[in-house]
Image (tube, helix red, strand yellow):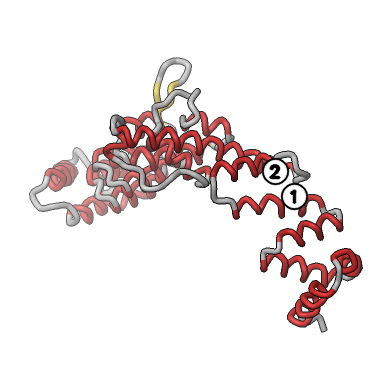
Amino acid sequence: MHDGNVITAVLIFLKRTLSKEILFRELEVRQVALRHLIHFLKEIGDQKLLLDLFRFLDRTEELALSHYREHLNIQDPEKRKEFLKTCVGLPFSAEDSAHIQDHYTLLERQIIIEANDRHLESAGQTEVFRKHPRKASILNMPLVTTLFYSCFYHYTEAEGTFSSPVNLKKTFKIPDKQYVLTALAARAKLRAWHDVDALFTTKNWLGYTKKRAPIGFHRVVEILHKNNAPVQILQDYVNLVEDVDTKLNLATKFKCHDVVIDTCRDLKDRQQLLAYRSKVDKGSAEEEKIDALLNSSVSGRGLPPSGLRRQFSEER
């Protein structure tokens, strides 16, 4: 009847009353029971019997993966590192082999960074550690968390150091989008706006600079707002959003008044400008700016009637 509970109950009895060799030989020709036993051994954490079973079945990759999972039971970082070193070279798939190597390398780096930063923090001579004390150890953290930590505490370090964000990016082949996203979050949290600006500034072979964001400037704006960036900085990046509707939505959402007003002016959208006038403070510079644009349109020097927006957009 393929009742899993019954199968498992029988397997528990056989496991207790038969030698491993006989049990494994019987299971080899009973695949349903074999799958149930593997699942049961994983559930109860009987790693030794599971390894013996995989070894008997010559399932080398599963044997290697099961062995690798043992690192979760090792709390001491140095012992865990040494254990991971024994996993490198086991018969994993190519993808898993790369993962194991990266895991070992990352923990090795984390141990070095942790020891160095603990010393710097206790010495009290490094400004970033004084202003922003560490809340947790970096040991055994994921790669992205380690990169964020590195961008937060070690952003300006030379590439040759283990804690350098650029070194981490190259060593672990972190994609540009992931790197920029993480670096932006870290530097914005520190309110290091100059670093944020430099992150998106590129220079061509003629020496001209321009802003480029592999993650899209709409995401940049969201992250900057989340970290309470000043309105002027928000406006600069909202202005870099190419899609007009997205730009207007972001500018309205985050109260970047000048961007909304200037975009409506460029679109010659009198109706939207009139609607936005009610959203700015009475007597503010923004209200005066809107009134000046509306008045200039009345005198024939500025905005055309609002119905021309669609025609103007199509011409653009």
Percent x, y of residue 88: 70, 40
Percent x, y of residue 86: 69, 41
Residue closest to the eye, 220 or 29: 29
Identified by mark 1, the residue type is Ala
Identified by mark 2, the residue type is Cys
Kindly tell me whether residue 268 is visible in this rendering.
no
Q: Residue furthest bottom?
A: 1
From the viewer's perspective, is 82 left or right of 300? right
Q: Residues within 10 Å of mark 2 (few under 14, many from 20)?
A: many
User: SS for tag 1?
Assistant: helix
Q: Quadrant of residue 217?
A: top left
Residue at which label 2 appears: 87
Percent x, y of residue 47: 71, 59
From the viewer's perspective, is 219 left or right of 97? left
Which residue sits at x=75%, y=45%?
Answer: 93
Q: Quadrant of residue 56?
A: bottom right
Q: Quadrant of the N terminus?
A: bottom right
Residue closest to the eye, 222 or 26: 26
Classify 166 as above or below 24: above
Residue closest to the eye, 236 or 129: 129
Which residue sits at x=45%, y=15%?
Answer: 206
Q: CA distance from mark 2 to mark 1?
A: 8 Å
User: SS for tag 2?
Assistant: helix
Residues tagged 2 and 1 counted as in contact (Cβ below 8 A): yes
The numbered disc on residue 64 is 1
Which residue sits at x=41%, y=36%?
Answer: 151
Q: Earlier in the sequence, mark 2 or mark 1?
A: 1
Q: Quadrant of residue 121?
A: top left
Q: Residues within 10 Å of mark 1 (few under 14, many from 20)?
A: many
